Image (cartoon, grey):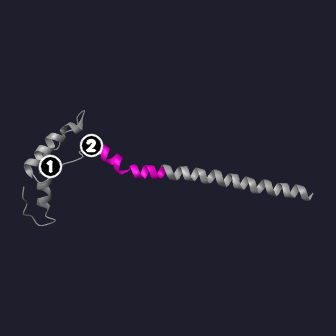
């Protein structure tokens, strides 16, 4: 499939979109079952393209935000540890002050 359109040409974008609409699989019980059919269609269009790691959109989204989710969880854990340590430190300072004030009486 060769395209002789200039970059930014709206007709080229529409032609590519129409091509993908022709073999876009409808969502059924197992979307990954279409992987072999899609690979065959892509191989017929351009044998130089290799499709690897075919996933559903939900899997791709989950994979893309996994690092953000892990970082959020770690930041929450570190925040709780910092809160606990600062609470223990504040308790120590206040109890020390109280003891000193009781000794001076």
SS for dot 1: helix
Q: In the picture provided, is 2 more to the left or to the right than 71?
A: left
Quadrant into which the N terminus falls: bottom left
Quadrant into which the C terminus falls: bottom right
Q: In the picture provided, is 52 more to the left or to the right than 66?
A: left
Q: Which residue is mark 1?
A: 20
Which residue appears farthest toward the bottom when viewing the image?
Answer: 6
Q: Main secondary structure of the magenta part?
A: helix
Could you tell me which residue is drawn at 79 percent across and 53 percent down? 95
Residue 55 is drawn in which quadrant?
Answer: top left
Can residue 25 be seen here? The reply is: no
Give coordinates of residue 77: x percent, y percent.
Answer: 54, 49
Dot 1 alpha-carbon crowd within 10 angstroms: few under 14, some 14 to 19, many 20 or more: few
Q: Which residue is mark 2?
A: 56
Which residue is at the front of the view, 44 or 10? Answer: 44
Q: Nearer the viewer, mark 2 or mark 1?
A: 2
Dot 2 alpha-carbon crowd within 10 angstroms: few under 14, some 14 to 19, many 20 or more: few
Label number found at residue 58:
none
Range shown magenta = 58-72
Could you tell me which residue is drawn at 14 percent across and 66 percent down? 7
Is 64 within the magenta? Answer: yes
Q: In the picture provided, is 4 more to the left or to the right than 81?
A: left
Could you tell me which residue is drawn at 21 percent across and 48 percent down? 52
Give coordinates of residue 72: x percent, y percent.
Answer: 47, 51
Can residue 79 be seen here? The reply is: yes
Disc 2 to disc 1: CB gap under 8 Å: no
């Amino acid at each position: 499939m060769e395209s002789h359109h200039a970059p930014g040409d709206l007709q080229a974008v529409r032609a590519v979109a129409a091509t993908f609409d022709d073999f876009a699989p409808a969502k059924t019980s197992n979307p990954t079952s279409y992987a072999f059919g899609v690979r065959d269609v892509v191989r017929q269009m351009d044998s130089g393209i290799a499709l690897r790691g075919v996933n559903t959109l939900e899997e791709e989204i989950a994979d893309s935000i996994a690092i953000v989710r892990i970082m959020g969880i770690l930041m929450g854990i570190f925040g709780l540890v910092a809160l606990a340590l600062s609470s223990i430190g504040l308790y120590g300072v206040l109890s020390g002050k109280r003891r000193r004030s009781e000794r001076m009486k």
